[in-house]
Amino acid sequence: MNLLNVRDLRKYYPIKSGLFSKPSGFLKAVDGVNFSIEVGETLGLVGESGCGKTTIAKIIVKLEKPTSGRVFYRNKDIHSFSRHEEHNYRKEVQMVFQDPHSSLNPRMTARDTVEEALIIHGVGKKERDTRVKELFDSVGLGEELMNRYPHELSGGQKQRISIARALAVNPKLIIADEPVSALDISVQAQILNLLLDLKSKLNLSYLFIAHNLPVIRYISDRVAVIYRGRIVEYATTKELFSNALHPYTEILLSAIPAEGSLRHGQIKTTELNVESGCDFQNICNIASEKCRNVKPDMVAVNKNHFVSCWNH
Amino acid sequence: MHSIRTNDLLTVENLKTYFYTPEGILKAVDEVSFSLKEGECVCIVGESGSGKSTLALSILKLLDESARIEGRVAFNGKNLIELSEDEIRKIRGNEISMIFQNPQSSLNPVMRVGEQIVEQMINHKRMDKKEAKSKAIELLREMGIPDAEKRFGDFPHQLSGGMKQRVMIAMALSCNPKIIIADEPTSALDVTIQAQILDIFKRLKQKGISILFITHDFGIVSVIADRIVVMYAGRVMEKGTAVEILRNPEHPYTVGLLDCLPGTSEKDRLAYIPGTIPSLIEPPEGCVFSPRCRFRFDACSKTPPEYPVSDVHSVACFLFSNEVNG
């Protein structure tokens, strides 16, 4: 069953040189993005800094308005919700941020942080107590930590609190924006396992945003690779990692440092802005005349694999 | 090839860096010893709070007064720890230079990047301005910066993160140092840029420059390291040649850490190390890793010495003591 459907999403920010001047151009943070997430599925969104992945997340949780395009949740446009539907949507779609330290209120205890959402959604005191205990238990935190403040907790514990807070209102979809990149490797593994356990236990869906390909591979069912605001390749995890087709995906994969690898002589440092054609043409080793003139469309290689490149 | 170069350029012996804080004594670096040979890259690997950055800063005495440094850092027949501020300043940026994690905050935002490189050469090498400028441009070009002459006059905010880190490396190289200490120089960069920067470090190594590379990323270690020092809670857990440690890790911490990595192959479930890094003010009695260790036994209530596993590999763990193994 389809849970979230994103159609031709665009977000352009005007570039202004002065406070009152007219925009001299537009920064296309998100430029025609399409994807969907099924119930119980994890979609990995991978790309480098500035590629628009966080902007997409912000649009979905309605922290940003798209310039154009639509987002459907359970086949309904999220911008034409009734009040009741809106309320429900904000409950069912929750976000976990990258840096647990700056996303928790330093003046609230762990317990208060988790309980706050329950209060807002009108849950009674007695029920709240049991629910908070349940939540602490489900994210693997001991009850003795309930009265601690964020500065008294480690990075991993703080991220567990953020996850408990997101789970408090029984969400269906969790948008996780680089949830493990600020954590140490030994703790990162704990959190990744926790996210997988919760997913199967609560039948959650994730939109998992990261720049780290091994992490994406571990957690995702399908992966979308983004370059400069556009999805360049979209495939099941297995397909993508065994048969990457887009030159950008290949570069990302080859740039992961690992013993004996690193074939990165191919990455060029050059002017990235293009006037027409494929965004990737200046870096690409196989760019042809067509790539310089016409933007490639997304084409299906098979039913599990889509790529936006003229060479396929 | 590396076995031919046997002369140690830098020797760290029994280094202790303690911070005297109102809450107590924080043992950030405790009894750390290792050496760096000519043209070699030693990687200090550890998680946050392992003391790896403090170790780097201690070598060049870049810490404030709350830190007490003890032990020996032998370089060129001198103990760097005992040098006065004036004496160590002649070594910093000159014979030993340092590159930090975040190039954005290490560059002066109101000074043209070229001038920042030139300044160093004029101070340390007494070069004249013209000569220094042409060397700076040459260095920028060597770092793969296109249009080096033009970029020389740019301010830091006009450059991307990767470009800024290239400028930092050019600056570190400007006085022909023997040693470069790099503290997580690629952690703030995208993977593709990281790959380019690592390439630069590999070239430096070929030129005979020794590199002390600080990182938490085993992927980077496997690409660049000749030898590895694994640190945890201020102490050395394991050290040896890169091949040895990556192929046959012995310390339970190193083994656990390598198992935690979601590698480039498929894994059903990630292993993890339970618990978290201990407080350095009240570290656990005995082996600092013991509270999280699966193999903990009676002996672990004492601090383990380093036991040799082979002549290029040693482990600070009682599992490797002969008495225990009989």
Image (cartoon, coloured by chain):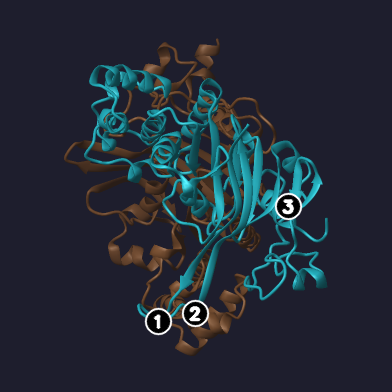
Chain colours: A cyan, B brown
Label 2 close to label 1 by CB (< 8 Å): yes
Tell which residue pokes out farthest to the left in this image. Answer: B22
Residue A88 pos. (x, y %): 42, 35
Residue A112 pos. (x, y %): 25, 31
- The CA span between labels 3 and 2 is 34 Å
What's the residue type where badge 1 is placed? Ser
* Residue at x 27%, y 33% (from the top left corner): A152
The residue that disc 3 covers is A250
Chain to which mark 1 belongs: A
Pointer 3 or 2: first along the chain: 2
Chain to which mark 2 belongs: A
The residue that disc 1 covers is A21
Query: Which of the two marks, 3 or 2, is nearer to us in this view?
Result: 2
Q: Quadrant of residue B325?
A: top right
Q: Quadrant of residue A170?
A: top left
Side of B308 where A147 appears, left or right: left
What's the residue type where badge 2 is placed? Ser
- The CA span between labels 3 and 1 is 41 Å
Chain to which mark 3 belongs: A
What's the residue type where badge 3 is placed? Glu
Q: Is residue B74 above or below residue B276?
A: below
Residue B102 pos. (x, y %): 44, 59
* Residue at x 44%, y 72% (from the top left corner): B157
The residue that disc 2 covers is A24
Q: Is residue B102 above or below residue B244?
A: below
* Residue at x 50%, y 52% (from the top left corner): A54
Observer-nearest of B5 and A90? A90
Residue B77 pos. (x, y %): 43, 56
Pointer 3 or 1: first along the chain: 1
Residue B162's disc is: none
